[in-house]
């Protein structure tokens, strides 16, 4: 497989549009013109589950770029994943899409044929591609409908950071307008993409943002990247919304979704905890004087924690193909278009529930500090997260909520430092016991690290007391 970052913009034009001059867009650059015929067969579920998340799978036949192409959203544009040409969608791509397609089969949803007048503009010295301008005459067949139109695509090459102003200005003055649809498939199916939600309510918008992040995390995990933290945070935010604003939601629509989210988040947490602890303990070890590091401590820490992390990661991978997990994703997908809100809540109702979450966080922190109890401090940390996320949700309708977010983010940081220290002491104690019974190792260095983590936890408790003051 090959992955290519695609950065492109589209313009709508009519049949009478005349492409403006291109030979001076890049000073001294070369313009290479070719004509190619392309045929793209798009695959999705019958419900359009891939397209709902801005993901496209197509088989490309024609004069060039033949093969299978999977386009997925990226912060800088889209990543195009390419494989060789086969008769049916290849397993290496369909397996990546198991979560997004909710385990459903993929079917041919549209065939689009394009006659492309391609203009490739390269820089003069190294001849690297700056910009490609494609003048596309398109014919599409979908649901027994035949459609035809013309559009302009401008794709940035490796030698360009953005579309040259001169080019954008000329296209606009010649009558081109920014495209209404992000892709040709969106145009023929009349979909506007994942950001098009029917409910503009603050709760629905916030929930949809987290759901989109969860699906993005699913795809990232199946692609072999590491979106564990971001996916876990999105689940945490969604669970928090279900709890804090539960009175405004339909119990029947929500069902046991919070429990199922907690279940999957717990599996991700096992991976994330090993990542955090491994990094934290290795950093602490590196700060000790060399003469105090007795035995193969670094190797023990790396080997044991990495082994635990890989096993936890395998459990996540196994679960992601289970009916239970896919049913959870199906519920979240339903919420994107059919919000579980009973009705659009008033600003006063949002504030009331968010303020209640804030008061609970304050109360739990006070109780935990008074009791000097680690478990209660961890409980207070979770309450502070819910108060922060409830305030985050309100920012689009109440800018004053930003102060609340900042306040509880500080709570969360201090209590997070405390919890990391508590977990680290348990990890070090386990490693020390293993080392103490292994020839050539001893628990001395682990004891030093253990005392360090105890001190860090106590400093966090003191910081929590200062927060109350």
Image: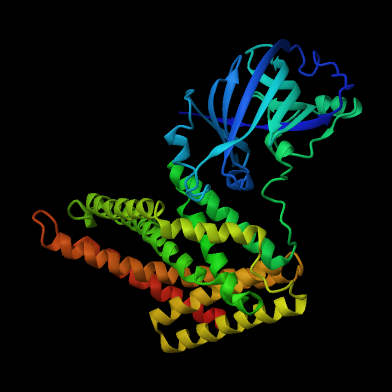
Against 440, is 443 above or below? below
Q: 94 or 30, which lies in front?
A: 94
At 59% from the left and 45% from the top, the residue drawn is 46
Task: Give coordinates of residue 264: x percent, y percent.
Answer: 43, 62
At 44% from the left and 58% from the top, the residue drawn is 325
Q: 162 or 148, which lies in front?
A: 148
Q: 178 or 65, which lies in front?
A: 65
Task: Give coordinates of residue 173: x percent, y percent.
Answer: 91, 27
Task: Give coordinates of residue 130: x percent, y percent.
Answer: 68, 21
Against 227, is 21 above or below? above
Against 390, is 26 above or below? above
Task: Give coordinates of residue 162: x percent, y percent.
Answer: 72, 31
The color scheme shown is rainbow
Most extreme residue toward the front is 144
Would residue 158 be seen by someone viewing this image from the given angle?
no
Most extreme residue toward the left is 439
The quarter of the picture where the N terminus appears is top left
Say which quarter of the image contains residue 291: bottom left
Say which quarter of the image contains residue 224: top left
Against 119, is 322 above or below? below
At 49% from the left and 71% from the top, the residue drawn is 256
The quarter of the picture where the C terminus appears is bottom right
């Amino acid at each position: 497989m090959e992955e290519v970052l695609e950065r492109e913009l589209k313009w709508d034009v009519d049949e009478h549009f005349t492409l403006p001059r291109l030979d001076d867009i890049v000073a001294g650059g070369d313009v290479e013109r070719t004509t190619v015929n392309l045929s793209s067969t798009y695959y999705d579920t019958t419900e359009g589950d891939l397209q709902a998340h801005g993901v496209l799978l197509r088989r490309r036949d024609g004069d060039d770029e033949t093969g299978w192409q999977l386009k997925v959203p990226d912060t800088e544009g889209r990543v195009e994943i390419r494989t060789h040409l086969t008769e049916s969608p290849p397993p290496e791509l369909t397996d990546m899409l198991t979560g997004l397609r909710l385990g459903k089969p993929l079917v041919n949803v549209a065939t689009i044929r394009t006659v492309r007048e391609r203009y490739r503009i390269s820089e003069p010295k190294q001849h690297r591609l700056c910009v490609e301008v494609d003048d596309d005459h398109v014919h599409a067949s979908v649901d027994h409908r035949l459609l035809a139109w013309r559009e302009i695509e401008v794709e940035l090459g490796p030698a360009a950071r953005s579309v040259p102003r001169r080019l954008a200005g000329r296209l606009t003055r010649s009558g081109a307008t920014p495209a209404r649809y992000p892709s040709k498939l969106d145009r023929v199916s009349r979909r506007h993409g994942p950001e098009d939600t029917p409910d503009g309510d603050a709760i629905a918008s916030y929930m949809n943002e987290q759901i989109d992040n969860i699906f993005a995390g699913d795809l990232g995990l199946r692609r072999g990247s590491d979106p564990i933290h971001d996916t876990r945070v999105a689940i945490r935010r969604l669970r928090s919304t279900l709890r804090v604003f539960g009175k405004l939601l339909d119990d029947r629509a929500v069902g046991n979704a919070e429990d199922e989210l907690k279940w999957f988040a717990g599996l991700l947490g096992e991976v994330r905890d090993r990542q955090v602890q491994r990094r934290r303990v290795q950093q602490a070890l590196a700060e000790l004087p060399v003469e105090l590091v007795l035995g193969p401590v670094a190797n023990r820490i790396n080997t044991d924690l990495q082994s635990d992390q890989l096993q936890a990661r395998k459990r996540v991978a196994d679960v992601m193909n289970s009916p239970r997990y896919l049913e959870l994703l199906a519920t979240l997908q339903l919420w994107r278009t059919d919000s579980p809100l009973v009705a659009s809540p008033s600003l006063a109702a949002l504030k009331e529930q968010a303020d209640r979450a804030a008061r609970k966080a304050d109360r739990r922190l006070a109780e935990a500090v008074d009791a000097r109890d680690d478990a209660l401090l961890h409980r207070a940390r979770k309450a502070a997260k819910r108060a922060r996320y409830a305030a985050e949700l309100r920012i689009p309708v109440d800018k004053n909520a930003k102060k609340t977010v900042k306040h509880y983010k500080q709570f969360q940081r201090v209590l997070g430092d405390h919890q990391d220290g508590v977990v680290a002491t348990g990890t070090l104690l386990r490693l020390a016991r293993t080392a103490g019974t292994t020839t050539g190792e001893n628990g001395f260095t682990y004891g030093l690290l253990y005392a360090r983590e105890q001190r860090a936890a106590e400093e966090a408790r003191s910081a929590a007391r200062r927060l109350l003051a």
